[in-house]
Image (spheres, coloured by chain):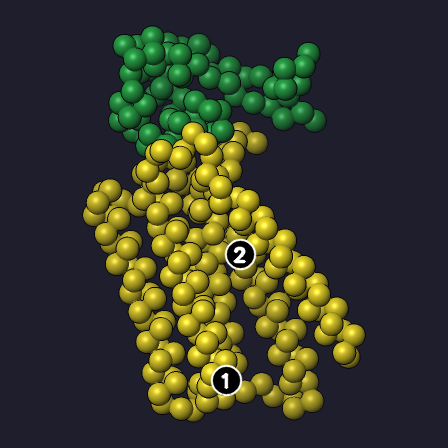
Amino acid sequence: MTTFWIGFAVLGGALVVIAIARFIRGLVPQSEMRDVPMTALETLGWVGLAVTGLVTAGLGVLVAVVGVTDLQEADSARFIFWLILIVGIGVWLAAWIALRRRNGGVVADERDRVVLARSLSVESMVVLLSLVTWTVVLTEAFWDDGTVPLAYLQLLFWTTLIGGAMGRSLGIVLGYRREIDTDA
Amino acid sequence: MPKARIRNQIRRLRFDHGEMTQQHLADLVGCTRQTIIVLEKERYVPSLSLAFEIARVFERNIEDVFTYVDGPERDGSP
C-alpha cells in the first residue's frame, strides 16, 4: 500500500510540475501585445485566477488549522469557511459588473467568443481531475471504515467548483496567448 | 498532412488607406484592436463574416485580402 501512495504522490507531483512549467511559459505575453491593454475578458480571466487562488489558499489554511471534522462541527470555522467563499464570489461579481459597465460587455468580438469557448476544455479537465483525485483519495482513506464523513463531500463539491472556475480563468488567460486557427 | 494557413494583406492595405490605425479598422469592422493585431501577425484566422467585413472596408475582393496557403509554403519551402 505504501508503494502505491509513493507512486501516486510522485505521479501527481510530476503532473503538477509539468502543468506549472507549461503555465508559466504560456503566460509570457506575445511581443506585439506588450503595449496593448488587455481585453475585458482577459482582465476577467486574471481576476478569476487571483480570486480562485486566494480562496483556495484561504480554504487550505482553514482546513489545515481546524481539520476537516471541525470544519463541519465548529460554528466559528464554518463561519470563516462561508465568509471566504462569499467574499471570493462577491469580488469576482464586482469585477465582472465593473468590466461590463466600462466596456459595454465582457465579450467584445469573435476572438473573445472563441477563447471563451475553448477555455471550457481546461475547465472540464480540471473538474475531471478533481473528481478522480477525490474519488481515489476518499476510497483509499476510508475503505476500512466503509463510510465517508459528510464534511468531505462538502469539500469535494466546493473544491471541484472552485477548481472549475480556476480552470476556466486559466483557459481564458492562456487562450489569448495561443495561436487560434478557427479553420483547423 | 501539412496544416493550411490563411495569409493576409491587412497591414499593407491599412497603410494604403491613409495609414488607417488598427483601432479605426477595429471600430469599422466591429472587433477589438487586439484582434486586428493578431490578425496582422497571422496568429488568428478570422471567421468568414469578419474576413468579408475587412475586405469591404478596403473595397477589395476577399481573395485580395486573404490568401489560402498550403502547409509546405508556410515555412517558405517549396
Q: Amino acid at mark 1?
A: Val
Q: Residue at x 57, y 31 (%)?
A: A184
Which residue is at a point 48% across and 49% down the rendered structure image? Answer: A171
Front-most of A21 and A114?
A: A21
Counting from the top left corner in percent of width and height, residue A141 is at 65, 82
Question: Compared with residue B63, is residue A136 higher up or lower down, i.e. above or below?
Answer: below
Give the CA separation, mark 2 to mark 1: 26 Å
Name above or below for residue B39 compared with residue B56: below
Q: Is residue B20 visible?
A: yes
Figure quadrant of residue B68: top right
**Left or right of residue B34: residue B27:** left
User: Which color is chain B depicted in?
Assistant: green
Determine whether label 2 and label 1 are within 8 Å by CB. no
Q: Categorize mark 1 by other alpha carbons within 10 Å: few (<14), some (14-19), many (20+).
A: some
- Where A89 falls versus B61 (above or below)? below
The location of residue B11, given as percent across then percent down, is 40, 16
Front residue (pair A35, B36): A35
Judging by the rendered image, the residue that carries numbered circle 2 is A124
Q: Looking at the picture, how far across and down is residue A181, in whole percent? A: 52, 31
- From the image, state the color of chain A: yellow
**In the displayed structure, does residue A171 sit left or right of residue A102?**
right
Question: What residue do we see at 76% from left, 78% from top?
Answer: A2
Asked if A125 appears above or below A133 in the picture, the reply is above
Q: Is residue A18 left or right of residue B30?
A: right
Crowding around mark 2 (Cα neighbors within 10 Å: few <14, some 14 to 19, many 20+) is some
> In the rendering, at what x and y percent does residue B35 appear?
38, 31
Residue at horizontal 48 percent and vertical 74 percent from the top: A60
Q: Amino acid at mark 2?
A: Ser
Of the two numbered discs 2 and 1 on the same chain, state the one appearing first in sequence.
1
Chain letter of the residue beneath label 2 in the structure image = A
Q: Which mark is residue A68?
A: 1
Q: Secondary structure at mark 1?
A: helix
